[in-house]
Amino acid sequence: MAGSVWATLRLTPRMNAVDLAEWVFLASLLTVVLSISQFGIKPGYMQEVSDRGKDARYAALRVSLLMTGTTGFVAGSVVAAALFFLRYLGHWQNSAVLLWLPLFGLLANLGMMLHTDLRALGGARVLAVIAAVTFPLFAALLEFTLRGGIDPLTAFFAAQCATSIITIGYLGHRAEVMRHAGVDLRFLRRALLIGLPVMGGLLAKYVADLTVSATFRWSADATVAGSFGLAVRATEPLMSLFIGAFQMAWGATIYQWIKQSADGAIVQRFSARSWWMTVTGIPLGILIAAPIIFYVKDTTVTMLDCMFVGMMISRLLAFGMASSMGFGQTLQRNYRVGMRLLLTEMLVSITVLPLLAIASTPWAILAAAA
């Protein structure tokens, strides 16, 4: 979270409205494409570790790293090529950052897999320590790139890549990936059968988010686009601190709860308590976003800024709640119901939201929040 806040505070004053909108759109686009490139392997791997134990996971981990690393590099290259084409057509402003995307895709997928491995082993606290340690490194690298005259968006991705290389090196050493030989191709088939519906649901969610980003980037004027971009950056710490931390803890413990209570009673009890996320998340989101916006904005905060912040808080809390309330899918190892719900959200977003944005920005914001 600290890295996200620092990047927002340091980079936002250096960006114009279009830069902010493209930052948000690029983040959403990478999330969608990298999600596709992972083929839903994460839940399958976590269940593999839960079923077979940590000492039998190495072949599955190695083949997962090989597959996701390759597909991540390809995914980043595809995004870069597509945006270079938009640049050629005059619809994209930041081109230097695109050269970093293949490496970013590779590192993002490797990092995801190693983080998943540590979470499956109950190492959420270790990940929190790593995040705290790498923040000063990221901040220093960001300052170094900015002082080197690199544009803000490129500086952000360059610093992210450099920090990820160090983190992945440590996690790979800790997981003892290179000390064990062999790959488990049969695991891939099992993991993909479990994970593809999960990927389908997440992909639908990410496409809905991408639609929101694209709508306010190209279906509105630069002022609206900039206000939306600022709101996304200001509420991102809520995702990291509140929703991300909750999901990390939930994913690391849900399989243990299922083992302790096969009928799901324990999971159901803790899932019901997650309604407190809404009660505490709304004021927490406002308390996080307000100081950031007041700090980085050199003009008066408008009602439009407040509406965008409210929209983002609503979407983030809904995403966090869905993570816990779908525990029945984990018990049954069948994620098709959740996928259908998220597909419905996606279809509504891509059909209704752009039309509302053309007619009225406030109505589009309310629709996205709902």
Image (spheres, grey):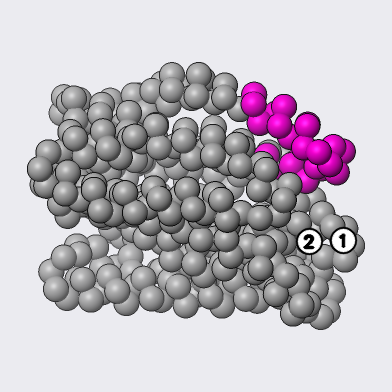
Crowdedness near tag 2: few (<14), some (14–19) or many (≥20) residues, C-alpha within 10 Å: many
Q: Quadrant of residue 57?
A: bottom right
Q: Is residue 87 left or right of residue 322?
A: left
Q: Is residue 279 magenta?
A: no
Q: Is residue 33 left or right of residue 134?
A: left
106 over 144 or under it: above or below: below
Against 227, residue 149 (above or below) is below
Judged by its main secondary structure, the magenta piece is helix
Q: Residue at x 70, y 54 (%)?
A: 333
The answer to whether residue 351 is above or below residue 104 is above
- Residue 7 lies, in percent from the top left, at 40, 44
| Pointer 2 with pointer 1, Cβ within 8 A | yes
| 351 vs 73, nearest the viewer | 351
Q: Which segment did they paint magenta?
A: 250-273
Residue depicted at x 50% and y 24% = 278
Q: Is residue 143 above or below residue 264?
A: below
Which residue in the structure is indicated by mark 2? 48
* Picture disc at residue 79: none
Q: Element at badge 1?
A: helix
**x%, y% of residue 322?**
54, 39
Residue 144 can be seen in this image: no
Name the residue type under label 1. Answer: Arg
Q: Nearer the viewer, residue 289 or 247?
A: 247
Relative to the observer, which residue lies in front, 347 or 38?
347
